Amino acid sequence: MFGFILRRLAVAIPTLLLLIIFSFLLMHAAPGGPFTQERGLPPQVLANLEAKYGLDDPLWKQIVDYVWGILRHFDFGPSFVYPDRTVNEIIAAGFPVTLTYGLLSFILAVVVGVCLGAAAAIRQNTWLDYLAVGISIGAQVLPNFVMAPILVLIFTLSLGWLPGGGWSFDNPDYWIMPVIALGTSYMASIARITRSSMLEVLSSNHIRTARAKGLPESRVIRKHALKPALLPVISYLGPAFVSMITGSVVIDMYFSTGGIGKSFVDSALNRDYAVMMGVTILVGALTILFSLIVDILYAWIDPKIRY
């Protein structure tokens, strides 16, 4: 297992480095610059701004300085739009909000999705199966940009139970609707994957053998069926987890949570390339990290999968 982890790390680290370089080159290939939207900037002022942020250096030097700043100090540099703030400060202000409701959405999606899918497979072709499939389909066809206004219409405008927007770490009332709106569609996908995987495992030979030995059905499910049935779910959870904890632009914008998605949209509108780079690299690094964790979980659950 230790050698397997080292091999995965040997792939993950160069991948992250390539991601940083590619993102940097892509941002510089975009038309315009961070200060070109400013009207009436004299050439000397523009030259001074570019010199201040190192934009007049050769491209190779900018890349080396940028990568070195990240590796040495985890420094993504200053914002081009807010001179008194760094990219690290902007991300640090929005990421805890997104992380909070993203983690809660993930827990909601996994717990409800796995239970719903497993129950549907165990009670196939019964009312419970039909109910679970119906809930999954209904949740799947309601993406977060549809779910969010429906929740506000019901719980804020009609019932008056929850605030329609904003964020507070001290008041869970602000968390409920973003969590439900973000986690529902993932819950539906997890339920569908769990159900189909569970049905396949329950019809396999080793389950028939376990039942023929007279083992209690609960033990057959818990010990012999659930673990292999979760393999496809785990492969889905890696990218899904990153998507949830890095947030949704729709959730941040609709509920005005102040999360990292809003920072990304604002930076794109303002051509604040430094912030866009920081958020892109953060999402990419988390994707690589959790892909690595999924690979390790795969190898732990099924030692034969150590390719």
Image (spheres, helix red, strand yellow):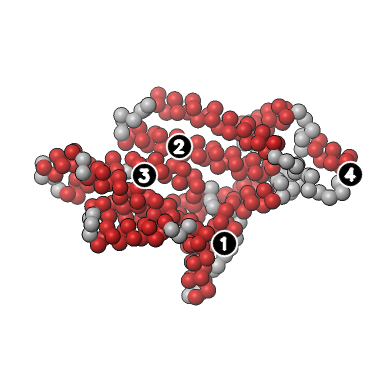
Q: Which amino acid type is marked by label 2?
A: Ser
User: Residue at image x 31%, y 52%?
Assistant: 117
Q: Are marks 2 and 3 in contact (CB under 8 Å)?
A: no
Residue on which disc 2 sits: 291
Mark 2, other Cα within 10 Å: few <14 / some 14–19 / many ≥20: many
Residue of label 4: 42
User: Can residue 185 be spotted in the picture?
Assistant: yes
Q: Earlier in the sequence, mark 2 or mark 1?
A: 1
**Which callout, 4 or 3, points at the residue further toward the start of the chain?**
4
Q: Disc 4 and disc 1: Cα gap in Å?
A: 40 Å
Q: Residue at x 69, y 51 (%)?
A: 269
| Distance (Cα) linking label 1 and label 3 | 29 Å
The percent position of residue 302, horizontal first and vertical second, equals 31, 33
User: Does the residue at mark 1 contact the one at mark 3 (Cβ under 8 Å)?
Assistant: no
Q: Nearer the viewer, mark 4 or mark 1?
A: 4
Q: Amino acid at mark 3?
A: Val
Are the residues flagged by discs 4 and 3 in contact, CB closer than 8 Å? no
Horizontal and vertical percent for residue 86? Answer: 69, 44
Residue under pointer 3: 233
User: Tag 3 or tag 1, which sits nearer the N-term?
Assistant: 3
For label 3, the crowd category at 10 Å Cα-Cα, with few meaning under 14, some 14 to 19 and many 20 or more, is many
Instruction: Estimate how packed mark 1 is, as few (under 14), some (14 to 19) or many (20 or more) residues with alpha carbons within 10 Å.
Output: many
Residue 2 seen by the camera: no
> Height in image: 10 above or below 162?
above
Q: Indicate the secondary structure of the residue bearing disc 2.
A: helix
Q: Which residue is mark 1?
A: 255
From what the image shows, is residue 288 above or below residue 83?
A: above
Q: Secondary structure at mark 4?
A: loop
The reply to whether callout 4 and callout 1 are in contact (CB within 8 Å) is no
Q: Quadrant of residue 230?
A: top left
Q: Is residue 278 left or right of residue 100?
A: right
